[in-house]
Amino acid sequence: MIKVAVVEDNKTLLGSLANLLNRTEGITCVNMLGNLMNVVSEFSKTKPDIVLMDIGLPNISGIEGVRTIRSNFPNILVMMLTVFDDDEKIFDAISAGAMGYLLKKTPSEEIIEAIVELHQGGAPMSASIARKVVQAFQKKPKNSLAEYRLTEREREILYALIDGLSYKRIAEKYCISLSTVRTHICSVYSKLHVHSKSQAVSKTLNRLP
């Protein structure tokens, strides 16, 4: 069962999304929130797998919400569901840690498909959003990782993360403790100015020749 939380300030849409999720086999809606004021305490109780979230929320924006959720619950996957399709909002959300980005005009069946895809390891995006992401990467000049001044061991561990190795496997590969692995990874994140594995991998791949 995929547990989904919905954060949306439009009560009608919030109810419609919850109904859609609850009538879909294998998915259940565990939270219906109109804002992010109590998101940490709420998610601590329900432990959702995925959060479907708007950007234009009252008090705390959805983009700031992504950062809060990812920093407190690293295993929760966040997918934006919004009307915003401008480059700034898209890349701010992805940089904050969002793993999917859908527009609100997305048909119900495609929202369900995206939730399943995200849960299975994908990064679903509306077609127009995916095109903007690809075009942005094509235009952006690549810079060497050298600018971040990673040590040789930090680079080794970063590439191990890209290869999908767990912390335990990295420790075994380089004959170091799990604590040392975590210390190196914290240093890598700090130097790359990222907050998660997905962001570190994305930034690294974008700078490889």
Image (tube, rainbow, N blue to C red):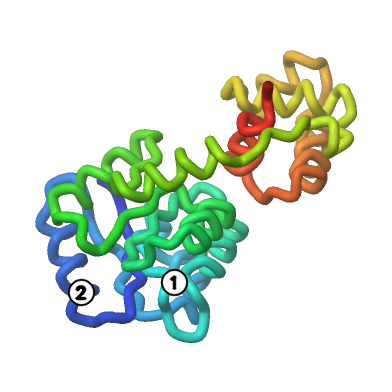
Q: Is residue 13 above or below residue 115?
A: below
Q: Indicate which disc, 1 or 2, sits on the residue closer to the N terminus.
A: 2
Q: Position of residue 173 (x, y in %)?
A: 74, 14
The amino acid pointed to by label 2 is Leu
Q: Mark 1, mark 2: which one is toward the viewer?
A: 2
Q: Nearer the viewer, residue 160 or 55?
A: 55
Dot 1, crowdedness within 10 Å: few (<14), some or many (≥20)? Answer: some
Going 68% across and 33% down the picture, which residue do you hit?
142
From the viewer's perspective, is 170 left or right of 108?
right
From the viewer's perspective, is 179 left or right of 107?
right
Q: Residue furthest front?
A: 139
Q: Position of residue 184 (x, y in %)?
A: 82, 35
Q: Position of residue 88 (x, y in %)?
A: 52, 61
Whole-number angstrom distance, CA of label 1 to CA of label 2 = 20 Å
Q: Residue furthest left?
A: 23
Q: Nearer the viewer, residue 209 or 176?
A: 209
Dot 2, crowdedness within 10 Å: few (<14), some or many (≥20)? Answer: few
Going 13% across and 47% down the picture, which residue do you hit?
25
Q: How many marks?
A: 2
Which residue is denoted by mark 2 in the rendering? 13
Going 34% across and 34% down the picture, which residue do you hit?
120
Which residue is denoted by mark 1 in the rendering? 42
Could you tell me which secondary element the residue under label 2 belongs to? helix
Could you tell me which secondary element the residue under label 1 belongs to? helix
Q: Residue furthest bottom?
A: 59
Specify the quadrant that holds the C terminus.
top right
Q: Position of residue 208 (x, y in %)?
A: 68, 25
The amino acid pointed to by label 1 is Glu
Please tell me in which quadrant of the rendered image residue 8 appears: bottom left
